[in-house]
Image: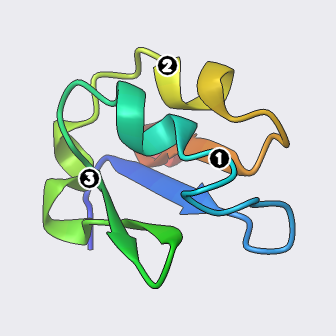
Amino acid sequence: MSEFIKVEIDKSKCLGIEACGGCLKVCPVNIFDEKNDEPMIVQKEEDECTLCDLCIEACGPNAVTIHKLYEDY
């Protein structure tokens, strides 16, 4: 589990890789991967997130959320 960042994909909103896949295409640090036509988070890479918000902007149905865990301290 990530120590600073938690990236989530709301499966009920996600359209899948073939219909969208925006998060996978734009992430500069590759925290997204693909499994069965659905995006998934590579948990060991989560803390590499640069908070660029490109995945959020590329996700048409707003299925991607980034939580800043360090703000909870």
Q: Which residue is mark 3?
A: 46
Q: Are marks 2 and 1 in contact (CB under 8 Å)?
A: no
Where disc 2 sits, the SS reads helix
Q: Are marks 3 and 2 in contact (CB under 8 Å)?
A: no
Q: Is residue 21 positioned above or below 55 on the image? A: below
Q: Amino acid at mark 1?
A: Val
The residue sitting at 45% across, 48% down in the picture is 69
Between disc 3 and disc 2, the foreground one is 2
Between 33 and 9, the residue placed more toward the observer is 33
Q: Which residue is mark 2?
A: 54
Where disc 3 sits, the SS reads helix
Q: Is residue 27 positioned above or below 9 on the image? A: above
Q: Is residue 32 shown left or right of residue 3?
A: right
Q: Amino acid at mark 2?
A: Leu
Q: Which residue is mark 1?
A: 64
- The image position of residue 35, as x and y in percent, is 38, 80
